[in-house]
Image (spheres, rainbow, N blue to C red):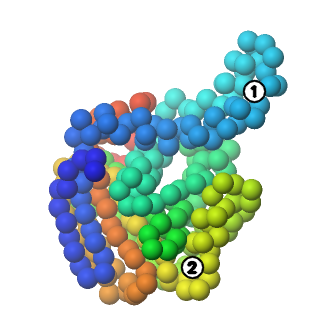
């Protein structure tokens, strides 16, 4: 596991954990996080599909300029990449189709659920993850408690089966045809059709601050009574300095939240 466990808050059906990333941890995971952020897999697939069209150095340069990732990343985009890395390496998740492939501006948000993919255990289930990124020195930061777009309200909505979960599944369905991961999608869909509550929901906070369980304690306590089997829900906070958040992206991060 990258980083150290800073705290654990257990409240019935919800686990809540805080993780602290130090400089050595960021050095270790940075290449993988940067690969997610830049969608290097998708870029390479596009490059291979188009390589025969570029016949001159000038045409190759033009193609590379089109495929190149941005020089800077919005704070939320960097946070989502870090969250995706954690959920993939530590929680058995797979996110096969980044929403950045469906946006015309790589730093614009597509709306809806932040991360949609699969959780592989004794069965394959859909996993929904909401991610908030903040360097506000408050515990919890406002992004967790906002009534309309806060992490708490979004988690509660997903747990209640709001439309965003259906939109997210449809998004994967429309992009799964002919892909290598369609088998996993079909297994997750089979699970969902049998019981639409049989899903995994993560709430992830990327907080450029010192660890403090006050970030998650009240959220876990408030959400716990509404979580029923077979739904699984977990809250995760990842702490690191603002400098390390910028370093993990190998580029500058455009800060959006008040310090």
Image x and y of residue 101, in percent? 64, 47
Within the image, what quadrant is residue 6 found in?
bottom left
**Image point (50%, 41%), residue name:** 37
Local SS, label 2? helix
Image x and y of residue 48, in percent? 71, 32
Local SS, label 1? helix
Is residue 243 visible in this depiction of the protein?
A: yes
Along the line of sight, the residue nearer the viewer: 209 or 60: 60
Q: Which mark is residue 191?
A: 2
**Image point (22%, 74%), residue name:** 10
* Relative vertical location of residue 199 with respect to residue 26 in this rendering, above or below: below
**Image point (24%, 35%), residue name:** 24
Q: Which residue is mark 1?
A: 51
Label 1 Cα crowd, 10 Å radius (few <14 / some 14-19 / many 20+): few
Image x and y of residue 253, in percent? 41, 37
27 relative position to 49: left or right: left
* Relative vertical location of residue 126 with respect to residue 225 in this rendering, above or below: above
First in residue order: circle 1 vs circle 2: 1
**Image point (55%, 86%), residue name:** 195
Is residue 76 visible in this depiction of the protein?
A: no
């Amino acid at each position: 596991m990258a980083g150290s466990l800073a705290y654990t808050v257990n409240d019935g059906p919800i686990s809540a954990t805080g993780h602290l990333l130090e400089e050595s941890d960021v050095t270790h995971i940075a290449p993988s996080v940067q690969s997610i952020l830049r969608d290097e897999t998708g870029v390479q697939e596009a490059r291979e599909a188009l390589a025969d069209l570029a016949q001159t150095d000038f045409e190759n340069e033009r193609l590379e300029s089109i495929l190149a990732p941005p020089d800077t990343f919005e704070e939320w985009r960097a946070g989502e990449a870090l969250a995706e890395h954690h959920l993939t390496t530590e929680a058995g998740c797979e996110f096969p189709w980044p929403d950045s492939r469906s946006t015309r501006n790589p730093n614009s948000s597509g709306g809806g659920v932040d991360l949609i993919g699969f959780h592989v255990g004794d069965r394959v289930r859909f996993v929904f993850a909401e991610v908030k990124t903040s360097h506000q020195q408050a515990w919890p930061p406002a992004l967790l408690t906002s009534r309309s777009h806060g992490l708490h309200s979004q988690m509660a909505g997903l747990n209640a089966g709001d439309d965003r979960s259906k939109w997210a599944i449809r998004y994967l369905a429309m992009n799964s045809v002919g892909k290598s991961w369609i088998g996993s999608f079909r297994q997750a869909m089979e699970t969902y059709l049998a019981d639409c509550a049989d899903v995994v929901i993560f709430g992830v906070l990327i907080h450029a601050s010192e660890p403090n369980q006050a970030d998650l304690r009240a959220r876990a306590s408030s959400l716990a009574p509404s979580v029923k089997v077979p739904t699984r829900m977990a809250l995760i906070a990842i702490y690191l300095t603002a400098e390390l958040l910028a370093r993990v992206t190998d580029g500058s991060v455009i800060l959006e939240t008040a310090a």
